[in-house]
Structure formats: structure tokens, C-alpha cells
Amino acid sequence: MKKILGMLGGMGPGATADAFYKLINNTKASKDQEHIPVIIVSIPDIPDRTENIIYDGPSPLPAMINSLKLLENAGVSCIVMPCNTAHYWYEDLMKEVKIPFISIIDAACKNIISNKIRKVALLATTATIRTKLYQEKLSLNNVECIVPDEINQYKIMQSIIAYKAGDIDKAKELIYPYINMLKSDGVNKFVMGCTEIPLILDEVVNCSPDEFIDATEALIKEAIDWYNFGDERFEKEMINENYQ
Amino acid sequence: MKKILGMLGGMGPGATADAFYKLINNTKASKDQEHIPVIIVSIPDIPDRTENIIYDGPSPLPAMINSLKLLENAGVSCIVMPCNTAHYWYEDLMKEVKIPFISIIDAACKNIISNKIRKVALLATTATIRTKLYQEKLSLNNVECIVPDEINQYKIMQSIIAYKAGDIDKAKELIYPYINMLKSDGVNKFVMGCTEIPLILDEVVNCSPDEFIDATEALIKEAIDWYNFGDERFEKEMINENYQ
């Protein structure tokens, strides 16, 4: 059986397309046939993750399980889900399938820790911040994690919402002042811990990729490692050790 | 049952990602949940289409049918296949499924004809040119179709191969002289009849989108029409009338 990567997408669709591009661009291939097989389910009518966590809106879990089952039934051998906030339900989703499921949070944290970075500023949805998806894992590994105050976090969330609504200019305007403020305070490592953020910050990220840790790219690189080196190494590194 | 678009991709993966981006960018949506549901199968280990048609290489049809069946079994309600050359097998693939299958060739020709364009230069793989996928349909509608001589067609094919191998600079170098030559001869409409070509020509296409008819974008706009207006209109326009 050939390995097929499964991408549980739609959260949002633009971030899913970005993850697909990053899969292609990070694969060494000299022709079509050498690229990694992937099935992408982008059924975006999934209740909003932040709305559920912060405002007690409807749960996205049943819709996410539906997409996951579609992927498993189609025969994929490993799952990635290019949405950080959705990883609040990572354990619930893992229980539903018998195949590996690479965590975007683990992948980004592995990148930070293995590069011996000691201090990062986290750019993420309000739900990702509140549920401490990154902070707890980073803290266990002695990485200081700066999170925005309430006003700046509100602006970052509005930036993500503006991007999802197609207003890229507004998205940029809302997020840049906070980044510039931190930079003037000497912060030089930012975790793009929401899959829309690399799309909002595309120009600045291309100019200084070392400053911006892209969770989507970290996830995709783990997926490529899984494809090239097999489940065994992946399971040992990603699940058992859990980067602690 | 909700409608889900199915994308038979992988030919090549970059072109599939481009079609996915065009689906997102052409959809009016103010939040994730308003985007069009899509399942994308990009299993690129499909024998090369041009190799089969021109040099009698192995047939890609069984692998294409495999991807098509994966999509149908996953519950998609309509198929698009962002690869022009692969439409040589369009009738064979249509027979395999009971759902609509929008032809990229029909979509691009519809765009040309409805815009009352009388003369176009076709940029495509050698196989698409030789099998006259565009020329016959355009000729029936009194559209003159300029195709490259053998030397220029060789360069265009090498350009497409270079893009697939990740060498974008070489791809551009190989295709621009021919386009510039035609432009100096007064040609002002080009059909990008290979889904890699809008990726090779991205800068020039963005500068003058009216000059370049993008088959991928035409296909995606038909798919969005199918999603918004239903099978009935689609079937009447696309299948019965066949733009003649």
C-alpha cells in the first residue's frame, strides 16, 4: 500500500491551500510523480473553534470527526490538520482513528526547542492563547512565551477574522503595530501559531524567515519526514517523547 | 445532502494547489463557513500524459480512474480535473461516474466564445496540441487558433517540464521569447491551455489578465456556478449545448 497523507482542512480554506503549497515546495521532486500523495478534505462548514471555546458556541468536534472519517475511509495513512486552535480537540480526534496524526503544536514546539530558542512571542487566536496550547508545552521546555495583553490580543483576533473575510489590508493594519512594538522591545522570535498568520504576514516573513516560526511549515516538514522515514521514527519522536 | 466539489488533481500538484487557491479567491465569502466544500485527491504517481500520447508510454487512465473513484466514494457531487492534457481521456472518465464532470476545455472555450474573441494563440503541452483538444472546438465556433511551430512547441513543453521540476527561472526563459514574438506580430489573446502555464507566467498574467485566458480560472468559475446555481443549469449549458 502506498502512503497517502491526509489533510483535515477547511479551517480556514486559505490556510489549507497554504499548507498544500508548503507540502509541494518542501518536497524534493524533479517531476509530478515524485510528489507526496495527499487527500485534502476542506469542508469549511465547521462551527468556529474560537466561538466555541470562548463564547460557548456550537462544538466543531462532530464536523471535524466527519472530515477525519472521510480521510480514513479514503485510505490515508497519516493525518495533518493545518489549524492550531482545532488542536484543542487533538486528543478527541486521535481517539477516532488508528493512523498517526501529527500535531501542529508539537511540530512547532519541536522546531523552537531543537533550535534552542529561549524566548518567543506567540501570535495566535484568542482561543489558542486561552487554552495554553503552546504555553504549557514551551514552559515545560524552559521557553519563555510572550502573549499579548487583552487589547492587542483583540486586535490580532480581528486581524485573523479580517483575513478570513478576504480583507487582507485590514488584517495587516491590525497586526503590524503589535509586532513592531515587540521588535522595538528587542523580541526577535515570533511563533505564527495560527495558520492564517503566515498569509497575513507574507511579505515580512519572506524578508526574515528566521524571525518567524511558521507552525504550518513545521507541520508540513514533519509530514514529509513521516513520508520519507516511516511511522516508526515519527511515533517515537512525536508521540512517546512529546518533546519534553 | 450538501454539495461537495471533487478535484481530481496531482497533474501536477502545483497546478492543483493553484486551482484550489482560485476556488477560494473567486468565492464570495465573509468567513470560513461560507467557502465551497471541496475534496482534493492529489496522488501524482500517474503516468505522464504527454509521454503516453506522443511516445506510447504507459496509460494514465487506470490511475486517473482510481483517483476519480476515491472522490466518488467520498461523496463528492461534481468533478473538476485541473489538467488540460488529461482531458484527452475526458469521455473515458465521464463513463466511470454518475455525477457531473466539468471539462476544463469546455470551460475555457466557453470563455473565449462568450467574449467574442476571434483569434487566440494556444499555449499547451505537445499532447494537448497534437490531440487538437482546443483547436476542433474553437474551429467549430469560428475562432482562429494559432499553434506554435515544432521548435517553439518543443521549448514550451520543456518550459512546462522545467516548472514541474521546480526550475521556475528556466521555465520562464523558455516560454517568454515565443510570447514576445507573437505580441510583436499583433497577437493579444493567449490561451493558457496547460495548468502549469499560469504559474510560469504569473507576473505577466497579473499585469494584463485580459490578454491571458486562464483555463484553470475558467474551470473554477464554472465549478462555482455549478455550486451556486445547481446541476440543472450546468448540465443544460455545459453538456447538451457543448458551446457549438
Image: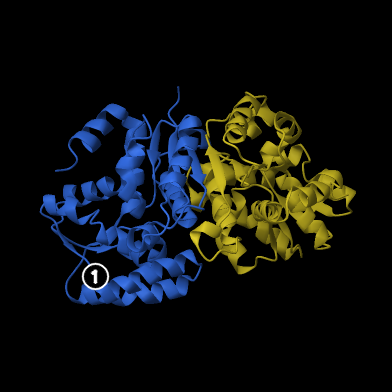
Chain colours: A yellow, B blue
Work out which residue is located at the far left of the displayed protein and give it.
B142
Q: Would you name the residue on which mark 1 appears? A: B148
Does the image show residue B233?
Answer: yes
Compared to residue A151, the image places residue A221 above or below, namely below
Q: Quadrant of residue A179?
A: bottom right
Q: Write the residue at 61% across / 61% down.
A: A26
> What is the secondary structure assignment of the residue under circle 1?
loop
- Vertical arrangement, residue A202 with respect to residue A75, above or below: below
- Residue A154 vs residue A44, the one in the foreground: A44
Q: Provide residue B102's location: percent of width, then percent of height.
A: 32, 40
User: What residue is drawn where x is 79% and y is 48%?
Assistant: A238
Label count reads 1
Q: Residues within 10 Å of mark 1 (few under 14, many from 20)?
A: some
Q: Position of residue B91 (x, y in %)?
A: 30, 41
Q: Quadrant of residue A207?
A: bottom right
In the displayed structure, A98 sits above or below B208; it is: above
Q: Is residue B168 left or right of residue A69?
A: left
Q: Nearer the viewer, residue B156 or A94?
A: B156
Pinpoint residue A73: horizontal percent, then vertical percent.
Answer: 59, 32
For the N terminus of chain B, the quadrant is top left
Residue B93: x and y in percent read 36, 40
Question: Which quadrant is the C terminus of chain B positioned in?
Answer: top left
Q: Residue at x 32, y 49 (%)?
A: B87
Q: Is residue A47 left or right of residue A168?
A: right
Residue B192 visible in the current orientation:
no
